[in-house]
Amino acid sequence: MNPTENKTSCESEINDSLRVPLLALFGGAALWLVGGLLLGLIAGIKFHAPDFLGGCPLFTYGRVAPAANDLLLYGFCIPAALGVMLWIFARLSQSPLALPLVPVVAAHLWHLGVFIGTAGILLGGSTGHLWLEYPRAAAVLLFAAFLLIAVSAAATFGWRQEKSLYPSHWFLFAALLWFPWIYSTANLFLNAHQLPRGVVQPIICWWFASNLIFVWLGLVGVGIAFYFLPKFSGRPLASSGYALLGFLSLVFFGTWCGIPPGAPVPAWLPALSGVAALLTIIPLLAILIVAVKTVCGASVSCNGGPFCFIKIGMISFIVAGGLYIAAACPQYSRVLEFTWFGAAQVQLQLLGFTAMILFGAIYFLLPQVMGRPLPLAKFTKLHFFLSVAGALLLVVPLVAAGIVQGEKLADASVAFADANSAALKFLRISTLGQLALLAGSLLFAANIFAMTIQWKLGIARTVIDYIKSPLATAKTSEVKS
């Protein structure tokens, strides 16, 4: 067998081992994405139409808003990211996925946990802690499912044929270790029978939220982007030294962030958190340098394909990091704290950065794994433009609403109700962004489910043809011999 045939055989084995796990992860993620954006749209409408679904207690703002955010994070971002990570580990290892049945079981456990958790929030069983609203039963399922997928990914990494490490390995393998640590620690403290007293609870919650939204999603998104940018641009990843600097500084400084400057805690905690947040400009600049040097000058057209999603995702990461630093500065936090500005930064991190990176990666890898083109390939370009327009219409008005609201809250002569009502016109614009994002998610889900249906129909045809095929008789066997 020549090297080309050997490489083709290896890729075929890798794709065969990944097909079912990725469909299980991506299918549920696409469904939860649509559900999360739909609930987010309901929550947004309630600000300028309070009577909307007012007779149904399941859809009060206090239940719909956290359910929407958790669906976007736990329902879409994390399982989709885990699927892409499995594919990258297998491709970089040049070996099939280890223990391929384990991620399939884990994917179903994860989606079951998301369903139980979302139902618990809508039925009034939320824990009340930010990004930890899921009840204990759902949290246990999510933790167990993540560990199972991490075992498969780590085994694939350990059995790799290519021993040299790529920068994506640093980011993604750290993410495999980071989530179980922060998720188990926060749940053991905040969802235990003996809760910590006083301000310890919000400190733990702020620490967890910062590590999850800024650090973990940053590790995953940048690690995936560093794999795909060289592939699209046709050149190696530039400046591995800057990539290492970005990785180490993001892990070190990002861990200390999250406590608001105006938090009612000992003064050294928000001061240390603010300094660490300011120093996160180091990983942002290092990652920006690597991405620009890798892509700049490459003869690749950006016409709404996977490359465009990755580029917009990296731009959103830098912008979201800038907003994160601005919110941590005492000079600006006096105006921006307790406003829509924080929600704008989180939504940009989720929908502008992480979701864009994952969309581009899935659109690229899924046809390779399935061995067939996307059934609705024309939807990809439309999805890109809807996602970009939706993210802009969602985030920019929320930033403006936060600034206007903060300035009025700082003015003692302005009533609290008047300060909140000043943001309504911006919230109406953000609703248009939510509609655009929801429409784009429907196109994405349509491609995923159409691909899954085609694959299942192909299996059914193969089984039927095998059953209908005539059996070889003894006489025929003797003639052939």
Image (tube, rainbow, N blue to C red):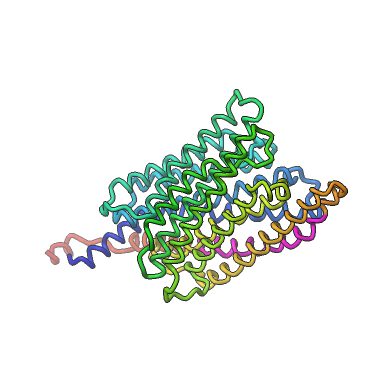
Residue 356 is inside the magenta segment: no
> Which residue of the protein is positioned furthest toward the top in this rendering?
194
Q: Is residue 5 left or right of residue 187?
A: left
Which corner quadrant holds the N terminus? bottom left
Displayed quadrant of residue 458: bottom left
> Which residue of the protein is positioned furthest toward the left in this rendering?
481
Q: Position of residue 279 (x, y in %)?
A: 53, 48
Magenta residues, start to end = 422-451
Q: Is residue 108 above or below residue 438?
A: above
Q: Position of residue 422 (x, y in %)?
A: 81, 56
For the stretch drawn in magenta, what is the main secondary structure? helix
Residue 35 visible (yes or no)? no
Tell which of 114 and 424 is nearer to you. 424
Q: How many marks?
A: 0
Q: Name the residue: 67% across, 51% down.
A: 343
Q: Position of residue 31 (x, y in %)?
A: 57, 54
Tell which of 340 and 371 is nearer to you. 340
Residue 447 visible (yes or no)? yes
Residue 447 is inside the magenta segment: yes
Q: Is residue 80 left or right of residue 34?
A: left
Q: Is residue 257 above or below residue 297?
A: above
Q: Name the residue: 57% across, 54% down.
A: 321
Which corner quadrant holds the C terminus? bottom left
Q: Position of residue 142 (x, y in %)?
A: 51, 40
Tell which of 255 and 35 is nearer to you. 255
